[in-house]
Image (cartoon, helix red, strand yellow):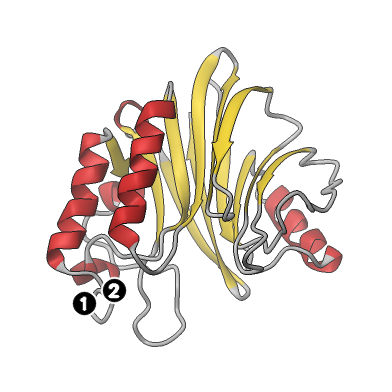
Amino acid sequence: MTKFKLAFFNVKGFNAPSKRCHIFSLLKKEKCSILFLQETHFKFNKYPILSHSHFPTWFHNGSDSSASRGVSVGFSKHVPFQYISHIQDNEGRYILMKGSIAGHTYTFINVYAPNENQVQWFKDIFSIINSFKEGTVLMGGDFNVTLNPLIDSSSQRSALSQKSLTSLRKLLNTSALIDVWRTLHPTTKDYTFCPTCMEPTIDWIIFSFQRSNSSLVWEHKLAPSSYLIILQSW
């Protein structure tokens, strides 16, 4: 079966050529196959040409109303990705893309979630996902919420109520999706966002049940002013 590495990276702005060059060099060195970038700050339909020879194929979603959003998905030249279809919002919050690799169908989902009205937003997007998804679902990004504050945040607190968190976990269950990091590391405390001592885990990597098995290998590394998560599957 096809083997590839997935990189999930909140780049906090991707318009500067020098920054793009640095990040592309890092991801190429890590031998990444598929890139999920959040907070690119790209404007809708005004995307820069990402002409990196190792990552030639890109799909973007940006926003006209805010310069702090934007998501992109990129493919290495070594990935024989065949595009089928995609959908996206008009706020630069998500992109859902369907395609095939080596005869297998995948649904790739990249998310940069809001930090308000979250429960309703997640209900809406999971409804869209369930009507669009096909084959193996690979979903990740910046979700701006901790699923289990007791182990996902050093403060053990969440801005959402326990009822709301339970509702989010049920959405994952009913969509046949699981949090890969927490499944492989059920008691480990490790964080992806560290603005203060609270250090929450607000970034999720989610797989459909049929692909979440012992063949998944997790590597977690911090990059300057951002986070980098690399997942290897086959």
Estimate the x, y position of residue 65 in percent, counting from the top left. Answer: 63, 64
Residue situated in front as seen by the camera: 105 or 114: 114
Give the residue drawn at x 21%, y 39%. 173
Which residue is pictured at 80% across the width and 41% down the height? 54
Under mark 2, the amino acid is Ser
Residue at left offset 76%, top offset 32%: 77
Instruction: Give the percent coordinates (x, y) of residue 69.
Output: 60, 63
Image quadrant of residue 73?
top right
Which mark, residue 31? Answer: none
Which numbered disc covers residue 153? Answer: 2
**Which residue is located at x 21 percent, y 50 percent?**
169
Please state which amino acid type lies under the numbered disc 1: Gln
- Crowd rating for badge 2 (residues with CA inside 10 Å; few <14, some 14–19, many 20+): many
x and y percentages locating residue 195 in the rendered image: 46, 83
Tell me the residue that label 1 is attached to: 156
Work out whether residue 83 or residue 130 is closer to the camera in this orientation and state it: 130
In the image, farthest residue toward the left: 163
Position of residue 119 in the picture relative to residue 94 (left or right) = left
> Rounded to the nearest whole Å, what is the CA distance between mark 2 and mark 1?
5 Å
Quarter location, residue 64? bottom right
